[in-house]
Amino acid sequence: MNEHPAPARSLQREILFAFALALAAYLAWLLRAELVLLYVSGLFAVVLAPVVRSTARFRLGRWQPFKGSALFFLLLALVAAIVAFCFLALPPVLSDLQQFGHELPTRLPALAERLKRVPFAEHLVSGNLSAQLQTIVSGTATYLLFSIRDWAGRLFDVAMGCILTVYFILEGDLAYHWFLSFVPPNRRARLDTTLQRARIRMGGWLVGQGSLMLILGLASTAVYLALGVRYAYALGVLTGALNIIPVLGAAVCITLALLVAAIDSWGRVIGVAVFYLIYVQIENSYLIPRIMKNRVNLPGLAILASLLIGSALAGVLGAMVSIPTAVLIAVLLDEYAVNRDPA
């Protein structure tokens, strides 16, 4: 009776596919924050998995102390390092803050006189300086009170990201093979080989990023010690550790170091500022392109462009995973999109 059943069924399938694709895109937009968290956690699991496997293979003679518990010992070592840093770094800072709080009322007149000698700062000390400071403190407290909810949400995201990363490391093979099961069998082996090649190159990002963190940590510690900045060792460790966050990590370190240096003298402030200006230029123009190029085999222009695009799309998280993401995209494009000239 129906002369064209096949085209009608084909049209129905195309309409259903378009509707399902639109629905999936809409759901992905609604869940974009959660999907980004899943992607970042999975990417960190891919990068950190070789470290876990290397730790598990560590031997003392015939004894493998971390076999089966490598991830637990790595997490324990990380927590111990954070606790040790806080235990060694916080007491001097808290002691100085307490002493500064006791001496603040007697230091206010001298501070006001010093501010009056700073160009364009006369309006800062007009009137009652104590009242102005109280207003500033009150405003800061109000801001912190209203931002507690945002910080709690960020801390929850960080904790959930760490938990997801652990689960991806433990059960990543199951998730990976489940993903491959959606690919036709005749194309599965090629995709698997391509992704494994990308995984090896992405693992080099961790070594490169660790090298950048170590260089900045050692250089900043040496400069802080030479300038006589307080808490030089603690600031150096923190500066190197926060360098894992591109752009924002450096900004936080600069602000913190300048504030600490300002406690003693403006000369130290100028010294710290000059050091960071020089280091940022060296890192962006030489260290990042050279180190990352050797580790992930990407051109320097591609590395800088990926950092810029990643930070614009997803802020801090985007900047953190921009280089391994660029490696993944480069490997996929090289395998499936690049048309090579015949030999």
Image (cartoon, rainbow, N blue to C red):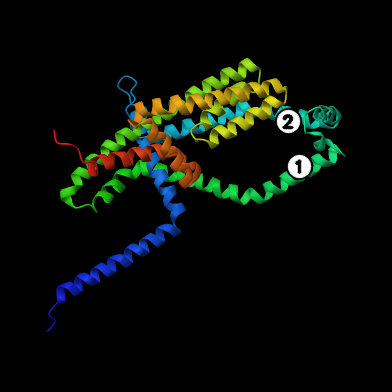
Do tag 1 and tag 2 residues touch (Cβ < 8 Å)? no
Q: Quadrant of the C terminus?
A: top left
Residue under the point 57% across and 25% down: 276
User: Where does the image place residue 137, in percent across and percent down from the top left?
Assistant: 76, 42
Residue at image mark 1? 137
Instruction: Tell which residue pokes out farthest to the bottom in this image.
Output: 1
Observer-nearest of 299 and 17:
299
Instruction: Tell which residue pokes out farthest to the top in this image.
Output: 226
> Would you say residue 230 is visible in this rendering?
no
Q: Secondary structure at mark 1?
A: helix
Residue at image mark 2? 97
User: Where does the image place residue 206, in percent across and percent down from the top left?
Assistant: 40, 31
User: Where does the image place residue 68, in percent across and percent down from the top left?
Assistant: 34, 35
Nearest to N terminus: mark 1 or mark 2 = 2
| Dot 1 alpha-carbon crowd within 10 angstroms: few under 14, some 14 to 19, many 20 or more | few
Q: Nearer the viewer, mark 1 or mark 2?
A: 1
Residue under the point 15% across and 76% down: 5
Q: Is residue 132 above or below residue 284?
A: below
Observer-nearest of 17 and 181:
17
Observer-nearest of 137 and 66:
137
Q: Say which quarter of the image contains residue 248.
A: top right
Direction from residue 39 to residue 10 in the image, left or right: left
Q: Say which quarter of the image contains residue 17.
A: bottom left
Q: Say which quarter of the image contains residue 318.
A: top left
